Image (cartoon, grey):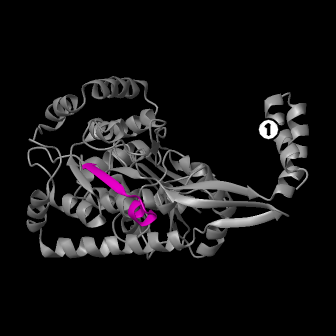
Amino acid sequence: MRVVKQGGHRLFENDPETASVVSVMLLDLEKHGLDAVRRYSEKFDGWSPVSFELDASQIREAIARLDTQVVADTRYCQGNVRRFAEAQFSTLHALEVEIRPGVTLGHRHIPVSSVGSYIPGGRYPMFGSAQMSIIPAKVAGVMTVSACTPPVKGEGYFPATINAIHAAGADRIFVVGGVPALALMAFGMGVVEPVDILCGAGNKFVAEAKRQLFGRCGIDLLAGPTEIMVLADDSADLALVACDLLGQAEHDPNSGVALICLSEDFGQRCLAEVERQLAVLPTREIARQSWATNGRIYAADSPDEAVALSDDYAPEHLELQVADPEFYFARLRNYGSLFIGEETTVAYGDKTIGTNHILPTSRAARYTGGVWVGKFLKTVTYQRMTPAASVEVARVTSRQCKVERMLAHAITADVRVTRFGGA
């Protein structure tokens, strides 16, 4: 492997300063409730409405302000997300099996009761994120979804975001952002019932708040700055590879942008092509920072080494622009979502195609996938037995418990031998 361009250290959401700031805020928010929410909202967003929750007339008014094409396109995107979530849900079956005579074991999938969905704003009003957490939760059978989204500074709520949240099926909509939004959903504050799971992407403060609230409620995953890796061989279209790298670089100065190629010559030419496209990119101010700091290009000595490098990086988004994609598809193990062939691109997954865009970053793809309908289901087990089977199992259980010196446990087995032994 040769390094054509070396990037900076990848970010992990464990900054002590961020953790301290969020900890102080959460304690304040838990103690002072909506008063603290309002104080922070005024401070950070200049936003202090009579109510943070939108009523039906406000929702209708927001939707009415939109071009009909925006509404239609959102419906198209959400239809894809819903169809894929429903297809995923159809694969999740209850199980019941008699593993020994008279011993029946099983599992069921039970939806959580409530979900708090955070739809980020910040630099870009990412209204497409609404369907990524709300629709899978509703398909899973979640009864109540409360959604929070920050206001656009100086403008109030963003109509396209409100439309997307409403169309996705949220039961409650609040216009409040950042740590206060997560605190409102997790603590309830007398406004909503405290949620069972917090879901959605956000900045480093949102990610840290989810980390600190985990245990109080569940979370989907810790999603940090976005990442793209393109795995390309010499057959790839150089301009398309550079274009896709920069497509993610515009997100944030901390975005991770990486290329693994199969020749140093391709890597050098791609480096030059990125610089050429950066010069005319409309969002070059952010993309240039991201590429300069975090952009990296590796030239692998073989396809097998390319696979190893990619799996070690474990990217959030991985694009395959290679002559033989099936070779890589069969071998790659660590990625959040895989885009196979130049016909697909990360923006499709982010906005339109139907797979989820809330995905693991910072190498978390080594141990988890992204948000899907299963994130909102609890797989719980049960058991039932005949009296004869209970006696058989009780005798083994009693002996095992006595070896462990857990005598009260053993007694619960022994009394069943006495009760059912003559059955």
Quadrant placement of the C terminus: bottom right
Q: Does 29 sit above or below residue 320?
A: above
Residue pictured at 37% horizontal, 28% vertical: 18
Residue behind mark 1: 412
Q: Residues within 10 Å of mark 1 (few under 14, many from 20)?
A: few
Residue pictured at 66% horizontal, 69% vertical: 330
Q: How many marks?
A: 1
Helix, strand or loop status at disc 1: helix
Viewer-closest of 53 and 271: 53
Residue pictured at 32% horizontal, 42% vertical: 185
Magenta-colored span: 136-148
Q: Position of residue 324 (x, y in %)?
A: 61, 75
Magenta span contains residue 106: no
Magenta span contains residue 139: yes
Q: Does 16 sit above or below residue 6?
A: above
Viewer-closest of 120 and 166: 166
